[in-house]
Image (cartoon, helix red, strand yellow):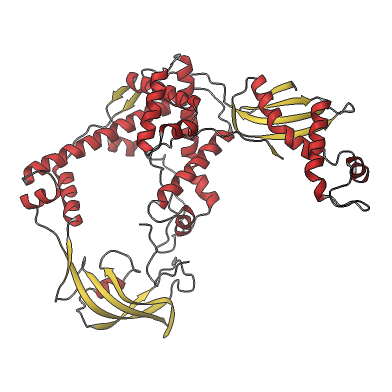
Amino acid sequence: MIVKNVEKKEKSTVTFEVVCDAAEFEKAVNGAYLKNKSKIFVQGFRKGKAPRMIIEGMYGKDVFYEDAADDLAPAAFSFGAEQSGLRVVGTPAVKGMDVSDDKELTLTFLTAVWPEVTLGQYKGLEAPKAKVEITDEQVNEDLEKVRRRNSRIVTVERPAKLEDTAVIDYLGTVDGVPFDGGKAEGHNLVLGSGAFIPGFEDQVVGMSAGEERDINVTFPEEYHEKSLAGKAAVFHVKCNEVKETQLPDLDDELAKDVSEFDTLDEYKASVRERLEKAAEADAENQFQSVLIEKAGDNMTAEIPDAMVEEQLDSMVREYDRNLQMNGLNLELYLKYLGQTPAAFRDSIRPTAERRAKTDVVLDAVAAAENIAVSDEDIDGEYENLAKQYGMELDQVKQALGRDVIEGDLKTRKAAQLIFDTGVATEPVPEEAKEEEAKPAPKKRTAKKKAPAGEKETEPAPEAAGEETKPAPKKRAPRKKKTEEPAGEEPKAE
């Protein structure tokens, strides 16, 4: 094979040609014939027995060229990329195929490559760092959560009030006609939770066990079931039982039950310490995030689209895994949001772009600083990963190549260099932020009001943390309903 015409294109892409000599191509063509001959029927021959020259005579001498090129393309691309010293990103594509009179095959490839980088300032960068101060109110809020986690629900003989759980049967009608999803028995409704449409829970307040009443409500104009949107409805409701949530007293006994401490004061001190550590870690993470972002903004590099798409693919998988841990999946989650997969990818694209830029700038800093890692560092990382994921050491080594671990450790050291040289500044007061964010005065124009209750599409949440990078795969080049009761919104737990 011979490589020629290597050309750099825009957005960190490269084209190059690989010439396969006549012998290589002939071998691939014959292999394509042997693989496909059983699928070709030629009159006068048993199926799969027709000679190659007969098939080529019927369908043209190039009948097996495309399959032969497909077979040669992966090896040709790998050879061309290696010979050209290219650091390939994403999935390459075959952009052209030509067979000369001498039966030499020329394949033209297009691939994204790791961008060329000109670093700007990455040492001594300044970023605001929040001061950690835990208030008594925050401690009390945490203690209240502990009380709620240790609460018990008991039946009470009194009218229902807000925050009680009413066990109800209901039947909903519109114009006297029942509708799908408008009936339930023994439903546990927490009053004030907002689980049902506005007005419903307020009218259940005051009901006692055994009491029945009609509740009049109007479905919101933007209600997800279009046939009910804006319609007046009547729900006949029977209250079977009223339960209240009883919280434990905030005392030494509770402290003993939920911790290793004997007194409430000791437990409170431990809560404050835990909140302080969490706040300090969050402030440090925010500080480091701004430093990395500034280093990325200071560099000059054309980030190829393929790098961003790889990050997007990784983030989509990450979201799906996290949702599955809570009994959902991404498809169902997007259905709840009323969002298409394409719109979801667009909503997380800015994060994917930041991740791609971070990878590039840290790689460039590692190279500029001649950062190296030892064999002991790599072996230690393998052992840490094996413990973290509960895998055998050999399994981890098979899944993640040594070059992947080495690259990851180098970028971590590069990030630490940026953090260690970073300068923490005073955070900007919220009042100053608000003042800075105010737009310049404009001439006012009449503005239409949005329909009452209309909601904006929720943005996709940020993915928690960075994903552990899997080992790069060898890629071949490619050619060019569950029913819900009416009024109750589905919610992701």
**Residue 199: image x %, image y %?**
31, 71
**Residue 211: image x %, image y %?**
22, 83
Q: Quadrant of residue 372?
A: top left
Image quarter of the C terminus? bottom left
Horizontal side of 198 relative to 33 (left or right) equals: left
Q: Is residue 353 above or below residue 157?
A: above
Q: Quadrant of residue 210?
A: bottom left
User: Residue at horizontal 53%, vertical 54%?
Assistant: 340
Horizontal side of 370 relative to 48 (left or right) equals: left
- Please state which of residues 174 and 39 is positioned toward the viewer in this rendering: 39
Look at the image and tell me whether residue 55 can be seen.
yes
- Please state which of residues 309 and 391 is positioned toward the viewer in this rendering: 391
Q: Is residue 76 above or below residue 487?
A: above
| Count of all numbered marks drawn on residues in the image | 0
Look at the image and tell me whether residue 120 can be seen.
no
**Residue 42: image x %, image y %?**
90, 51
**Residue 394: image x %, image y %?**
44, 32
Image quarter of the N terminus? top right
Q: Quadrant of residue 409?
A: top left
User: Residue at horizontal 52%, vertical 46%?
Assistant: 345
Q: Is residue 272 above or below residue 127?
A: below
- Please state which of residues 139 and 290 is positioned toward the viewer in this rendering: 139
Horizontal side of 415 relative to 133 (left or right) equals: right
User: Residue at horizontal 89%, vertical 46%?
Assistant: 50
Q: Is residue 218 above or below residue 26?
A: below
User: Residue at horizontal 15%, vertical 73%?
Assistant: 156
- Please state which of residues 280 and 259 is positioned toward the viewer in this rendering: 259
